Image (cartoon, coloured by chain):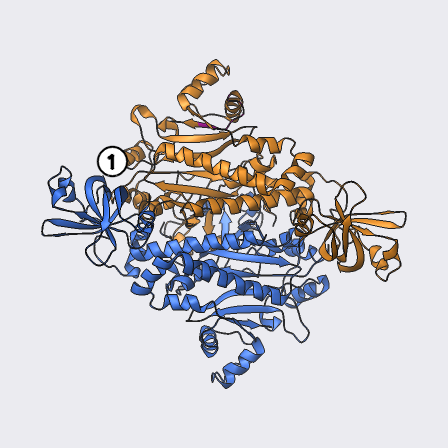
Chain colours: A blue, B orange
Amino acid sequence: MSIKNILQKDSIQKSITVKGWVRTIRNQKGLSFCNVNDGSCPQGIQVIFDKKFNEGTDWEIVKDIYTGTCIEVSGDLIESPAKGQKYELVAETLKMIGYCDPEEYPLSKGRIPLETLRRYQHLRVRTKTFGSVFRIRSRLSGAMHRFYQDKGFLHIDPNVITVNECEGGAGVFTVMENDVTDIQQAPRDETGKYDWKTDHFGRRAFLTVSSQLHLEALCCGIGNVYTTNKSFRSEHSTTNKHLSEFVHLEVEMAFNTFNDLMDHSEEFIKYLAKDVLEHCKDDLESLNKFVSKGIIKRVEGMMSEFKRVKYSKCIELLREKGKYKELKYGDDLWAEHENWLTEYFDDRPVFVTHWPIEIKSFYMKQLDGGECESFDLLMPYGVGELIGGSQREESYEKIMKMMEDKEIDPEPLTFYTDLRKYGSCPHGGFGLGFDRLVMLFTGIKNIRDVIAFPISYGSCKY
Amino acid sequence: MSIKNILQKDSIQKSITVKGWVRTIRNQKGLSFCNVNDGSCPQGIQVIFDKKFNEGTDWEIVKDIYTGTCIEVSGDLIESPAKGQKYELVAETLKMIGYCDPEEYPLSKGRIPLETLRRYQHLRVRTKTFGSVFRIRSRLSGAMHRFYQDKGFLHIDPNVITVNECEGGAGVFTVMENDVTDIQQAPRDETGKYDWKTDHFGRRAFLTVSSQLHLEALCCGIGNVYTTNKSFRSEHSTTNKHLSEFVHLEVEMAFNTFNDLMDHSEEFIKYLAKDVLEHCKDDLESLNKFVSKGIIKRVEGMMSEFKRVKYSKCIELLREKGKYKELKYGDDLWAEHENWLTEYFDDRPVFVTHWPIEIKSFYMKQLDGGECESFDLLMPYGVGELIGGSQREESYEKIMKMMEDKEIDPEPLTFYTDLRKYGSCPHGGFGLGFDRLVMLFTGIKNIRDVIAFPISYGSCKY
């Protein structure tokens, strides 16, 4: 039985056994107090090695217990006379499962900053903060699947190795089987270039930046679909929001309207907020107390109605009320503009809608006057863009013309434009960086601290 | 409302609307019969354009309807006088949503073999078989998450780009940012080799073949975990069971025993079988009728008790009863041996346990006498190995010695062997190829037909 299950019973219990890792141990007047955690809850369980235990055979073992040691303890759970916890376990027997040398163990010290813990990604999951983050992360993942399965969306993960560079080729990784380390020996074609024909796929292949185009193909035949694939970006960014690899929720809906799409996105975020508030109370409280002050209030804030404002209106507001005089229609919005907007709208999430197609992607549904049915969903408290979505252009003629205007080669996208020829239908969808969602729900400020083994420009260690 | 929802009401209904793609249309004595499908169920809905409709304004549109056309039809749902369906929709209004030219549309013909449909991966999802396969696939995915979430396992997907080659480097893809097409210009180090320091991660990186080692690090700190990552193999295999990219369920349990691990695997498969039999009845029946005769009986068969037989006993049986005289202790089992074993045990799933560590991986829990606590789970009816699992060696000394014996460089695996130094604990886990699971539950014989966009040696088209 996990420590969480034991504590959830909220009653004294005879002869229980816990197994886990020691967080802290301190000795006081011939007694030892030991906090043991098994990863099931933030607080762990308080174990007492008392004077009676002292007379038994397992006493010797206590001397070898340090932070990080793995132990098995049995005894009775009683009401704790001390404050700090409601129950405590009075040890009767003790087994050493795995010793941990305090001289060598990098996490033997007390509180260690998150930045330092990034050096120990294989161990940091044992700490209180990372335990809470990963439990909330997992809960969000489960809730996401439940939400879509209950609505009848089909979960289908397209290929992440692809010949499709999607939106123009910037920031794309290449995948190859041949080892080019010994570059003199690398196979060449008749022009002296590397001979991609000799490689695994007989041509150059990439890691996907988005599964959207593939998802559209599925959606236009089997209806609503979603994927939880990884996507990849080779950009040289070292901000606290960008990584080379991230979990990408992407959704496509058939026969929907633009408003349906926003309603759906809003419902989804609120569903997650409600779920996490209900089921991750202990973890949110622990984060609220130690790491992310105000996080509970902020998650509760997601239950308020989201604003929907046209891009043109946002530009006007930013220029006039926000004093961003240099900003003009047709400009993209930067982090500071996004933050200003959510603050202006009382810290509520804001859909910025109807962007000029000129600064958006070729596949977005065109409207008269140069706008398109697209939105960015901005989240408050500095989180910024969480979701980007749009209706997709369903007219073959219009999408071909737009690809021409944007100088996109239509040939590799024949499969995609085919969808507009063979029974085209209104559809739309969005993409969401799942890791940023976890940041939002945990209040963790650096994306490297919500992912088990984050990899980024210049950094791949595991 | 989806066609599935409409038909599930199992009653006549006034003024309903359906949107979907035409599967078939035929004209007979001034009437038209049209099967429309929206991807929600295998059978679709039968639409009648009758003589009354003929007198209305939308009649002209019917002439332009072919297989693949996307339409919207409204009318009453009545009991069907014809056999083949219980209800039919008598059209009152009709809208053309997306035209589909029968001269160009590749799926305009009747039944098309699965092999041919592989050329149209962006369209084949519209066919009856692929609809059923992807609905069952999605149901399995949802059930898998539900199973693990309900048990409190944490869903954490480690990095798929890794510097770790795991089990020796065979069949690993390299990931790079630099474009080496113009190979003369590729950056070189002082020895004339390709300079990996100039690439995205400052060193060579790979696509993972398994997340197991990373999962173990998480498990030994936060308890039971699972991942649904993609894994990758660059092997030159073109069988019907191997691909370059596949969905890999991997599970790690803490403080468990070897028997727990097998109990858990068995419970998991049975849970899925029960869930699919309950919720995918129509799809299973459709596959049973047209593509995979006997599939329902085979899925039901998974509810019987799984056999557990030691490897040494299997070798003995294969030699003596199976007449595989050339087979000896220490040999790996091949497909024909696996098939013989499941047939011998009355078509029941078989755990082959306690393999010689000599032919297994360095991380498996060693037993006296050269065996290890490992199993392969063999499925009947030619499916073969579905799951490979083991307890993990938790002794630092033993695992270091085994790595030495197997000539594995311990340096890149320091993070992994660390786990045996800092509070080591008994743990074990397994890996399962999710796509093979879908084959098992659909009866589809080629893995290319259970994946939306399969990629394999020499073949990456989307």
Question: Which quadrant: the N terminus of chain A?
Answer: top left
Report which residue position mark 1 lands on. B397
On the image, which quarter does residue A75 sit in? top left
The one nearer the camera, B352 or A356, is B352
Placement of B263 over or under B29, stated as above or below: above
**Highlighted magenta segment, given as a residue range:** B345-351
Amino acid type assigned to the residue bearing label 1 in the image = Glu
Residue lying furthest front: A11
- Residue A177 seen: no
- Residue A371 seen: yes
Residue lying furthest left: A29
Is A416 on the left-hand or right-hand side of A294? Answer: right
Seen at 33% across and 62% down, the residue is A285
Q: Label 1 marks which chain's residue? A: B
Is A10 on the left-hand or right-hand side of B47? Answer: left
Residue B35 x/y as whole percent: 76, 48
- Give the total number of marks visible in the rendering: 1
Residue B188 x/y as whole percent: 41, 53
Seen at 62% across and 42% down, the residue is B133
- Prevailing secondary structure of the magenta residues: loop
Disc 1 packing (10 Å; few <14; some 14–19; many ≥20): few
Residue A444 x/y as whole percent: 37, 63
Placement of B84 over or under A147, stated as above or below: above
Placement of A104 over or under A394, stated as above or below: above
Is A138 on the left-hand or right-hand side of B395? Answer: right
Residue A431 x/y as whole percent: 53, 60
Residue A249 included in the magenta stretch of the image: no
Is A423 on the left-hand or right-hand side of A192? Answer: right
The one nearer the camera, B378 or A175, is B378
